Amino acid sequence: MIRVLVMSDSHHNYGLMGTVLKREKDIQVLIHLGDEHDDVDHFSELTDKINIITVPGLYHQDYINYPKRRCIEFSLENHIFQISHSPKDLILTNKNVEIFMHGHTHISNIIHQGDQTILNPGHLKTLVDRSHTASYMIMEVERERILVKLIDINNSIMKTELIGINEI
């Protein structure tokens, strides 16, 4: 099993990011979905043994200067993921992708569309932004399934989803 922390839209709020990074132990992969993806650089002491995957937000120089970094595909176990900051940069027509992830809206969500799932962990901008509490996701990725937990900044599980062959 691979434990993955997914966060987005931290906007330089190192307090909220630090709370999450100190709380969530045994993370092998950290995914940051932009605004500001380089915030993870401020936590090298907490992330030095973690595989970090990031995409830039719309107004970041990396988004402007490196268009190929706007949407990234990778695999964990036998699952293919695609990540971007904006949902508009996702290539939803790619039927090989099982899990799409984006940020930008600051609204957490888990949406199923046939064999594909779209995840948005919400935001870590402030305790509440656009009427939505700060939140993030933990994924437990195994070969045949993915357990997704949407967690608010107060450590309350908002939603749990099981994705894959052994779905409930």
Image (spheres, rainbow, N blue to C red):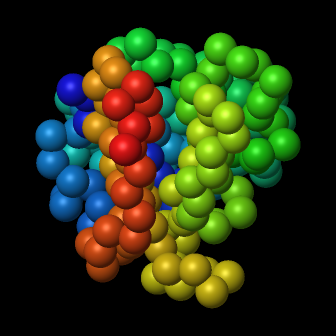
Kindly give the residue lying farthest to the front in the view shown. 168
Q: Is residue 50 left or right of residue 11?
A: left
Residue 16 image offset from top left, x and y in percent: 38, 70
Kindly give the residue lying farthest to the left in the view shown. 26
Residue ID at (65%, 14%)? 96
Residue 114 image offset from top left, x and y in percent: 67, 35
Query: Can you say whether 96 is above or below 2 in the image?
Result: above
Residue 139 image offset from top left, x and y in percent: 35, 42
Report which quarter residue 116 is drawn in: top right
**Which of 58 and 75 lies nearest the eye of the viewer?**
75
Residue ID at (27%, 55%)? 21
Residue ID at (53%, 19%)? 80
Query: Can you say whether 168 is above or below 122 in the image?
Result: above
**Which of 107 and 12 lies nearest the eye of the viewer?**
107
Residue ID at (19%, 61%)? 23
**Which of 100 and 161 lies nearest the eye of the viewer?**
161
Q: Is residue 123 left or right of residue 105?
A: left
Instruction: Please indicate, yes or no, whether residue 95 appears anywhere in the rendered image.
Output: yes
- What is the quadrant of the N terminus in the image? top left
Residue 133 image offset from top left, x and y in percent: 50, 80
Query: Can you say whether 136 is above or below 76 in the image?
Result: below
Instruction: Please indicate, yes or no, whether residue 30 appears anywhere in the rendered image.
Output: no
